[in-house]
Image (tube, rainbow, N blue to C red):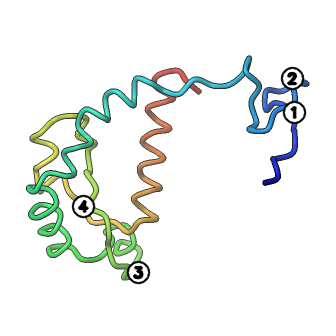
Amino acid sequence: MAKKALRPCRKPGCPELTRDGWCEKHRPEPSQQRRRTSAAYHGWYSKPIWTKRLRLDQLAREPFCRVCAAKGIRTRAVVVDHVVPFRGDWDLFVSPSNHQSLCKFHHDQKTALEQAEERRKAGQI
C-alpha cells in the first residue's frame, strides 16, 4: 500500500516533513477536559427515556426543522437538539421545553458554533 507523501509541518516556519500534517514538536494536544466532561453524560443518549420517549415525542410534535421552518422551508427534522446545552444537568436534558427539532445541517452548524464559543472562552483560540 502506498504511503502519503511527505509534507512540511502545518506550524508556520517549521521545515520538518511529516505524513499526517504535524511534526512531533508541534502536534496539538487533544482537548482532554472536554472529553472527560462530555463522556460523563454522553451515555444519557442511550437511555430508554431518550431513545424511546423524549426524542420520538419531540419529532412527532415538531417533524420539521425549526430553523428551516423559520425561513419558510419544509425540511424533515432528524435530530432533537437541546436549545440550551445541558452540560450534565439532568433536568435540562429531559425538559421538553429545552428540545427542538433540527435537520442535520442546522444541528451540526449550531454545535460547531457552540464548540467554537467554548474554545474561545477557554482561551484556546
Q: Which numbered disc flags the more N-terminal residue, 1 or 4?
A: 1
In front: label 3 or label 1: 1
Query: Where does label 4 land, which residue?
Result: 100
When the figure is inspected, residue 119 is found, relative to residue 74, above or below; the finding is above
Q: What amino acid is at disc 1? A: Pro
Lower sequence index among marks 3 and 2:
2
Q: Which residue is mark 3?
A: 73
Q: Which residue is mark 2?
A: 14
Q: Are marks 1 and 2 in contact (CB under 8 Å)?
A: yes
Question: Within 10 angstroms of label 2, few (less than 14), some, or many (20 or more) residues?
Answer: few
Q: Are marks 3 and 1 in contact (CB under 8 Å)?
A: no
Q: Horizontal placement of 26 versus 64: left or right? A: right
Is residue 13 positioned above or below 42 on the image?
above
Q: What whole-number distance in Å separates the C-alpha atoms at marks 3 and 2?
A: 48 Å
The residue type indicated by label 4 comes to Gln
Q: Which mark is residue 8?
A: 1
Secondary element type, mark 3: loop
Residue in the image at 87% along x and 30% along y: 17
- Residues under labels 1 and 2: Cα distance? 7 Å
In the structure shown, which secondary structural element does the residue marked by tag 1 occupy? strand
**Residue type at tag 2:** Cys
Question: Who comes first in sequence, dot 3 or dot 4?
Answer: 3
Provide residue 107's location: percent of width, then percent of height.
39, 59
Between the residue at mark 3 and the residue at mark 1, the CA separation in whole angstroms equals 45 Å
Judged by depth in the image, the label closer to the viewer, 1 or 4, is 1
